Amino acid sequence: MQARRSPHLHVTAMMALLAGASGCVGADASQGDKSAANENGEASPLAAAAEGFEAGTKLAYAAADVTLGSGTWNMDEALIGTSTSDVKTGARAARIRNSGRVTMLFDLDSGAGTVTIHHAPFGSDGSGTWGLFSSDDGGSSWTQVGATVTSSPGAFATATFDVNAGGPVRLEIRKLDGGSNRINIDDIEIADPDGGGDGADGGDDGGGGDDGGGGDGASVSVHTTLGLPTPASTDPDDFLSVKNGYVISYNAGRKVANWVSWELNTSYLGSTDRQDDYRPDDTLPDGLSQASLADYSGSGFDRGHMCPSGDRTLNTSANSETFFLTNMVPQASNNNRGPWEDLESESRTIARSGKELFVVSGGVFTASSDTIGDGVSVPDETFKVIVVLDAVGDGPADVTDSTRVIAVLMPNSDSAIGETDDWHDFRVSVDDIEAATGEDFLADVDPAVQAVIEARVDDQ
Ligand code: MN
Ligand code: MN
């Protein structure tokens, strides 16, 4: 189960690793091999192969081969960064710019299972996107594994991919946005295929196949551990965007998300104030239409958070990330400031009791839904699905017939909902929300379990 621990716990683990290998911080090139041994020595119990970029030197972006701890790699529009602006573990990390690539020139003969990679923008650079690719023909042809990842400013985030390929296979990391923002990559860990015990494979349980869901949400993000309500896609009306603190399926035609999905437990809760820095989402590709602040101004609707500001109070960057307009829908104030907010607060109360919550939220739309500003769709209703699991790190296999699921549908017009209304009165079944939205929630949960818990209305 530990592979599904929260990003914050990953950061904690990385800090511990850094502290344990403190002798390698600031090491010069002559100490590089020792650094690699420290870093990879920590990783080896979990990983069939690992690369921390500690053992090589590459100072220029121009394409060249470099021999590292795991083997020889080609780095094109990429170098091994050692500056204080490089986000890194140990003394070095890969740094990629433009449409750069970091490519294995060797095969993993025993194949690759789950691959985890730490990533963050370099220095004060803005966000960028990248992907993991695999090749089973010695690098002649490549296939992207899982979804495109967005790196947002801040400390390392962890991306997890289920490669699940027998050998021989090799891997490549490609920067995909083509822009000048640089991205640091470090601490690549590659498990053997079906390497039991890392827990990430739990994401496959009941996923995919004929249940209509995206399947394998855990390989996209911890925030979609229970599945993707819609399959991963780069369709402009169903654009999957993975952020540090949540995952969205963005709909450029409506200029709001189809859904926003996030994990909630005590590791996300601190005392950081609301940043209130409402703004368009600078992590989305330029070609996707977005709402502007002006669209909401004077509209009569609130900028209603889906992943709440109050669920991300550990630090300013985590809180600020909730103020992207892509995490908002035009929300009636009686809804937003009344029962909706009361349920948000109740969720945090449950989380503080030690539970693991997975939440998906969004709007219900019809052909006659209103718009505000320059074509920002107003949902007819807002929905939320909250799955309450007993322990942090629980996943699809821990969801049973008796798991508590709170699902609500709230009218999104002030004439149809009161600010003092009780959120409990808006409870429905998950099946009701699936029927209204066409999404498949809990897609990676055993279909037989979904059938039971999605038909039930919470009564606690
Ligand atoms: Mn709100
Ligand atoms: Mn479902």
Image (tube, grey):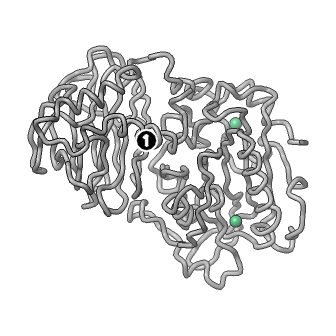
Quarter where residue 415 is shown? bottom right
Residue 390: x %, y % from top left? 72, 33
Left or right, 147 with reference to 368: left
Q: Ligand 1 appears in which quadrant?
A: bottom right
Residue 93 in sight in this render: no
The C terminus sits in image quarter: top right
Q: What's under tag 1, amino acid-wise?
A: Thr
Quarter where residue 426 is shown? bottom right
In the rendered image, the vertical position of residue 270 relative to residue 336, given as above or below: above
Furthest residue to the bottom? 298
Residue 11: x %, y % from top left? 45, 43
**Residue at the image point whose x is 55% and y is 66% from the top:** 323
Quarter where residue 405 is shown? top right
Residue 1: x %, y % from top left? 56, 26
Which residue in the protein does label 1 denote?
A: 158
Label 1 CA crowd tier, 10 Å (few <14, some 14–19, many 20+): many
Which residue is at the front of the view, 403 or 378? 403
In the rendered image, the vertical position of residue 40 relative to residue 311, given as above or below: above
Residue 438: x %, y % from top left? 68, 46
Residue 81 in sight in this render: yes
Left or right, 193 with reference to 325: left
**Residue at the image point whose x is 39% and y is 52% from the top:** 151
Q: Secondary structure at mark 1?
A: strand
| Mark 1 close to ligand 2, CB under 8 Å | no
Which residue is at the front of the view, 34 or 393? 34
**Residue at the image point whose x is 36% and y is 34% from the top:** 20
In the rendered image, the vertical position of residue 408 relative to residue 169, given as above or below: below
- Count of marks overlaid on the render: 1
Which residue is at the front of the view, 235 or 263? 263
